Image (tube, helix red, strand yellow):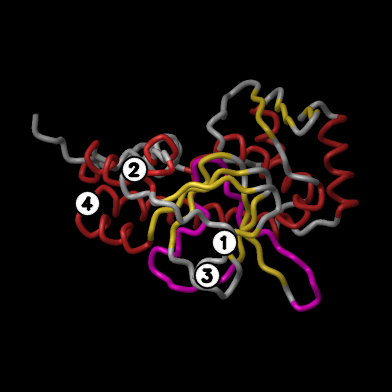
Amino acid sequence: MIALADTPHTPLERSGFRPARHLRDTELCRSPFLAAKERRALEQSVTWSKRFDPQKDLICEATNADDLLIVASGWAYRYSCVADGGRQLTGLVVPGEVANLDTLLFDQVSYSVRTLTEATIVALPRSQALALADTHPGIARTFTGMAMVENAISRKWIVSLGRRPARARIAHLLCEIGIRLGVEDDTEITFPFPLRQEQIGDVLGLTNVHVNRMIRQLLASGLIQLSDRVLTIPDVAALRYVAGFDPSYLHMDRVIDSAARPIAEPI
């Protein structure tokens, strides 16, 4: 079973829970592959929503997960630990994204998921998600597309770990997060940035001291501004240049082949 404490068990009718309100603004329901009826089917399949405090484990490595967990608000992260206690953050989950997409096909997860900030988590039962994918092509394509983007992000992180210098690693991560949060622009952008130096280091394979030094360099050069966990990138193009960042791997332009577009519903 999924490692969740205090999961609500009261009937949805008595709880006043309205799943569409929680799911509608997520990456899942914003998919360009979905027809209106498929979007409604997903919204109606959510079973519960719960708010979690920061630094609470939602899923533990090597356990079974029965639900897809969608971060409706707040941030979470995937991580794995090694025998000596070291930790690697293997994925960030920003608002609207699914924390454990591979649960769709595999019983056991190979990582843990923990909230980074206070977060609202929405649950979509695995069995229901599979049934919907079998009967709705747009939902199947949505899950496939999300998995492909996750893989693309992982590949870019591997390149950072293996080949990019520390300053470019951090710059690349900041550029990516801005786009994933939906605030990407060619000029100046501002967005919440709850990651601490230790967590940045656990993403990018850097020590706290090295992260601190590189952040100071980016601040001193005017490439970023950071205050009260809010990050501003005054010149997006300049930071992209430092990072060698090309946003095309995130596929946020929503361009899809005409054969994969949702089928129009009869009037």
Determine the main secondary structure of the stretch shown in magenta.
Answer: loop
Q: Could you tell me how far apart the alpha carbons at marks 3 and 4 are, in whole angstroms?
A: 25 Å
Mark 2 Cα-neighbour bin, 10 Å: few <14, some 14–19, many ≥20: many
**Label located before the other in sequence (2 or 4):** 2
Q: Amino acid at mark 4?
A: His
Q: Position of residue 249 (x, y in %)?
A: 49, 46
Q: Could you tell me how far apart the alpha carbons at marks 3 and 2 are, in whole angstroms?
A: 25 Å
| Left or right of residue 28, residue 201 in this image | right
Q: Position of residue 167 (x, y in %)?
A: 78, 45
| Left or right of residue 131, residue 231 in this image | right
Residue 239 versus residue 59: which sits nearer the camera?
59
Q: Amino acid at mark 3?
A: Val
**Label located before the other in sequence (1 or 2):** 1
Q: Which residue is mark 3?
A: 109
Q: Which residue is mark 2?
A: 43
Number of dots carrying numbers: 4
Task: Give the residues drawn in magenta, as a range.
Answer: 83-111
Q: Amino acid at mark 1?
A: Leu
Q: Position of residue 161 (x, y in %)?
A: 70, 59
Q: Residue at x 29, y 41 (%)?
A: 39
Q: Could you tell me how far apart the alpha carbons at marks 2 and 4 are, in whole angstroms?
A: 14 Å
